[in-house]
Image (cartoon, grey):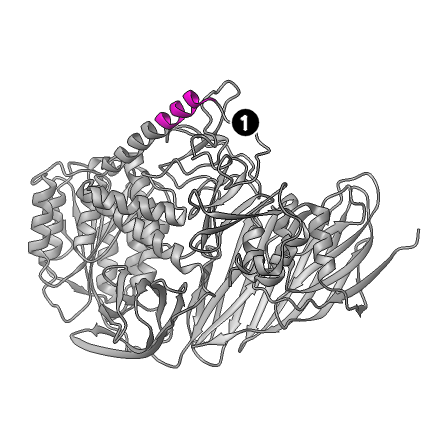
Amino acid sequence: MKRFWIMSTLILMLPSLASATGLMIPKDRSIGPLAIKYHRAEVKITDRVAVTHVDQVFVNHTNRDLEATYIFPLPKGATVSDFYLYMNGKKTKGEVLEKNRARNIYEGIVRRMKDPGLLEYLGRDLFQARVYPVPKRGEARIEIEFTQLLPFEGGVNKFSYPMRTDRSSSRTMKDFTLSVKISSKTPIKTIYSPSHEIYTRKKDDHHASAGFEKNAAVLDRDFELFYTVSEKDIGMNLLTYREPGEPGFFMLMVSPKSEYTSREIIGKHITFVIDTSGSMAGAKIRHAKKALKYCLNKLNPDDRFNLIRFSTDVEAFQKTPSSASKANIQRALNFVNRIEAAGGTAIDEALTTALAVHKNSKEPNLIVFMTDGHPTVGETNPKSILAHSRKGNRVSARVFVFGIGNEINTHLLDKISSENFAESTYAKPNEEIEQKLSAFYNKVSFPVLSDLNMDFGSIHEYDVLPKRLSDLFKGSQLLVFGRYRNRGHTALTLRGKVGDKTKKFVFEGRFPKKASEHDFIPRLWATRKIGFLLDNIRLGGEKKELVDEVIRLSKRYGIVTPYTSYLVTEDQVVARPSQPVIPRPTPRGPIRRTRPGWGRVATKSADSSSSPSADVLGGLEAEGAIAPSVMAPPPPRAKAKKARSRFQAYHREESKLLEKNTGATAVDFAETVKGMKTAKSDAVDEDDAAGIRHVAGYTFKFRAGAWVDLKYKPGMQTLKIKYLSKAYFELLKKSKKLKRLFGLGQRVTIVVGKNRAIVVGPDGRDTVSDSELKKYLIK
């Protein structure tokens, strides 16, 4: 049979910010989209012009050749420059033909696939190519290249890449790789992604790279990358989000330049303190010594340093700090080579000895404190140790603590670091010690600005996180989240110290009355606020007002915590933290698991009789909040009561885990809370909240087979719309935000006003008058 292919470009005029990754849809309606073997994208950005090259392979698992249509949604304003189809391994360039098809193509795809996730196609320029044949049990490889001009505002460039797909091909079989290379005439400052955990590297002020790679990647959200540019030594850029009539949210991105002359670099005074007690013997001490040698060899010529080892006794490399000359560094390396592990753990004496040699407040003072155990020699009372460190730290030295292994007092170590203006890091007793310490040292090796303070001018800001701004180092980035009440333009003033001199940097900021674009900011702010509250509970004890605030924020933004671990998928039960986590599919993509240490989810066993139901979660189906369930009917009220009791028991058990200060669970909790306090992206991995979706500023819970807005309350007026009906698509025409919300599933409940909600399901109205529709629109 003759092989052929026809390409066409569809330009669809409905506005939208969402999109989808390339799909291969067979002509045979009984077959879903073909599986994605791998998806690789290389992006080169030169002064706002982005050229994206995509390489995809699709797999035909059937026993016959297929005719299929390849579709790829293009970013706004993008133009296709190349398209290649590989036939029998041969790369052949195709011809692009334009046709004026539009909305009905998207609606036809949605109706056929029975997947509202494809509503994300609506409003995007769409490249379409018909492909034949896709060989039986074979593959089809596609390459497409397009060019776009990136949107730019207030010194911030934004790059978006389509990654959403339908649920049947929501995971790659192999890798999804995306790499971005940036070249800019204006110096690059911050590189940030709210959607994914990425690597970043700035080669110099004008060249940078970013990206990520993941096997079996979940394709459930678009990739977004912001990068800022500025001619100033310190760059600061502002993003905001605000719903009408509500206080706003903001995110500040602060970053210094990447290139400094030797005169601009401030010499630091750094002391390395290493635990050499008997418990450090073997792999721990071997890797710790390697890490120390790495740091010593990376010292700057203007630095001053010292080494202190401690076990039952405390021994310093020298009585006074040494200059970082080659001879002194070699002597220090010899000192490290002679270190052996034996004896007890004199934490208090080691810490006070290290603090005592830091006397000059005009230079950056850093202490790196490594230990694997509890205090066993000298002063062992944690309160007394903390009091001694507070009294001894006369120059505001930053004490960075590295806890090794699980047999450590995490509460003590975290308090030492937080009360001394730094943070703790925990490492496994293997090569992770080297990896984490060397990465830390690379970050702090060149201090730029310390003792930071931000003045928001005429803006009434509150709930700013972090509470204390961290120091800036060469190559570092600082993210500041907060809320604001009033509006207007203002001068934002950043002050900080360079040595003993205070420097001031002034930036212009606009805090608007309404801002709807950056809807990832509220949930990131809430994650950081919850992390801050949990840390206070963990280190200072449980207080009702703190717990109440954690629960309120958790429910509002769909964030799982030890106090709200009942927020799980309807047909699942909460398992004890020690139980294994078993993934299970949900209406869109795989089940998401909770953060390490709490609220873990396990599948219901075949003989279990305690699965929660609509009764447990408020009887929403009965009151009309959700469409009739396609799931099993709810169990009797006695079983529902039993399920509630199980939830409450697990809640009490998990919240008590916060009190633990030693062991694997304590280390797990310490790192999890730290991760929440410093959250940089809203990427929800497989280890995150089950049965929760946060979309366009809304938070939904999966209840009895439907996605229900957490703001829904009994008694609200509801408009029931039949899924894929005329009224369904009419609503989508009139509200771009509803496209993202309807994309959650076939049964969705959305609060659209103070007392109104839309209910989408299999039973509802086919048509609705325009006047009635207007009452239920989201602008």
- The vertical placement of 50 against 68, above or below, is below
Q: Where is residue 258 in the image (x, y as percent from the top left)?
A: 38, 73
**Residue 671, visible in the rendered structure:** no
- The vertical placement of 775 against 719, above or below, is below
**Residue 237, visible in the rendered structure:** yes
**Residue 38 vs residue 586, the one in the foreground:** 586
Q: Where is residue 191 in the image (x, y as percent from the top left)?
A: 44, 66
Q: In this view, does 360 lie to the left or right of 491?
A: left
Q: Is residue 381 left or right of residue 401?
A: left
Which residue is depicted at the point 24% across and 40% down?
A: 372
Q: Where is residue 306 in the image (x, y as percent from the top left)?
A: 18, 58
Q: In this view, does 481 lie to the left or right of 212?
A: left
**Residue 11 vs residue 8, the one in the foreground:** 11
Among all residues in the image, which is located at the extreme top?
A: 607
Q: Position of residue 513 (x, y in %)?
A: 38, 71
The answer to if 429 sits in the magenta stretch is: no
Q: Main secondary structure of the magenta part?
A: helix
Other residues around mark 1 within 10 Å, as few (<14) / some (14–19) / many (≥20): few
Q: What stretch is highlighted in magenta?
A: 636-646
Q: What residue type is disc 1 on?
A: Pro
Which residue is label 1 attached to? 633
Which residue is depicted at the point 14% across and 44% down?
A: 347
- The vertical placement of 282 against 147, above or below, is above
Tag 1, which secondary structure?
loop
